[in-house]
Image (cartoon, rainbow, N blue to C red):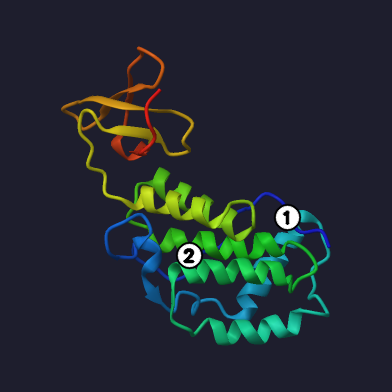
């Protein structure tokens, strides 16, 4: 059955906060709660219906998996899981394919909007990148370790100083911080160049890679 298209926006659940946890890049995903309780199966069906309408595809349940997934979901949404486990389960539902089309989009939408609510205290660019990483993991186009690294790095407090290695949020440029400006912006030099760029601190995250 056909499934994936570009992952688009959808309604968010009730408000939330950035999950708190111990230190380390995986700590945001260790928070535990009933993260899916705001989505009953009717809400999941509605998200899929919207995706099908936008994609001009037939909306409907998979006769082999739909009913079983609906029952499983209603049990799952009241379970206390870590945030990482919640994203794992969303990915598993995608693979079970309860709908005829756009299963990946449906469960990736829930993962992304859940991350938007829980990481609402992040700067907009960072929050957007966290949501993108989660959605792509649920949709099966990003592996778990990469998702953990992205979410962990972007969720860390911004506390930069000259000499720190940094990278852009998407990792397309890496370099080192040269100095901090009085207005709070960062001057940094990308690897392999003598050029200096000015950026907002929240647009950069720490980089453990060796400079070139």
- Which residue was labeled with disc 1? 4
Residue 9 visible to an observer of this rendering:
no
Residue at the spot 23% in from the left edge and 28% down from the top edge: 163
Compare residues 188 and 120 and report the one nearer the observer.
188
Q: What is the distance, in whole Å, between disc 1 and disc 2 at their CAs?
A: 20 Å
Q: How many marks?
A: 2
- Which residue was labeled with disc 2? 114
Q: Position of residue 127 (x, y in %)?
A: 42, 50
Which quadrant, please, contains the N terminus? bottom right
Compare residues 191 and 205 and report the one nearer the observer.
191
Could you tell me if the residues under marks 1 and 2 are in contact, i.e. CB atoms within 8 Å?
no
Which quadrant, please, contains the C terminus? top left
Residue at the spot 82% in from the left edge and 80% down from the top edge: 64
Compare residues 17 and 87 and report the one nearer the observer.
87
Q: Which badge, 1 or 2, comes first in the chain's sequence?
A: 1
Residue at the spot 65% in from the left edge and 67% down from the top edge: 47
Image position of 117 (left or right of 54): left
User: Mark 2: which secondary structure?
Assistant: helix
Q: Quadrant of residue 201?
A: top left
Disc 1 packing (10 Å; few <14; some 14–19; many ≥20): some
Q: Position of residue 180 (x, y in %)?
A: 20, 27
| Image: 138 above or below 39 | above
User: Mark 1: which secondary structure?
Assistant: loop
Q: Position of residue 130 (x, y in %)?
A: 45, 52
- Tag on residue 56? none
Q: Residue furthest left?
A: 182
């Amino acid at each position: 059955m056909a499934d994936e298209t570009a992952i688009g926006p959808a309604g968010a659940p009730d408000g939330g906060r950035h999950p708190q946890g111990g230190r380390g890049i995986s700590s945001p995903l260790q928070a535990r709660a009933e993260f899916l309780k705001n989505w009953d199966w009717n809400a999941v069906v509605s998200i899929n219906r919207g995706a099908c309408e936008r994609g001009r595809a037939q909306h409907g349940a998979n006769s082999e998996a739909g009913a079983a997934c609906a029952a499983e979901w209603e049990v799952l949404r009241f379970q206390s899981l870590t945030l990482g486990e919640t994203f794992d389960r969303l990915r598993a539902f995608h693979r079970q394919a309860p709908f005829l089309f756009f299963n990946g989009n449906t469960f990736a939408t829930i993962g992304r909007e859940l991350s938007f609510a829980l990481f609402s205290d992040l700067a907009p660019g960072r929050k957007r990148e966290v949501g993108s990483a989660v959605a792509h993991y649920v949709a099966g186009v990003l592996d778990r370790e990469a998702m953990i690294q992205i979410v962990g790095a972007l969720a860390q407090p911004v506390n930069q100083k000259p000499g720190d290695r940094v990278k852009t949020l998407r990792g397309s440029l890496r370099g080192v911080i040269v100095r901090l400006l009085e207005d709070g912006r960062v001057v940094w030099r990308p690897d392999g160049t003598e050029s200096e760029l000015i950026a907002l601190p929240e647009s950069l995250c720490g980089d453990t890679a060796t400079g070139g």
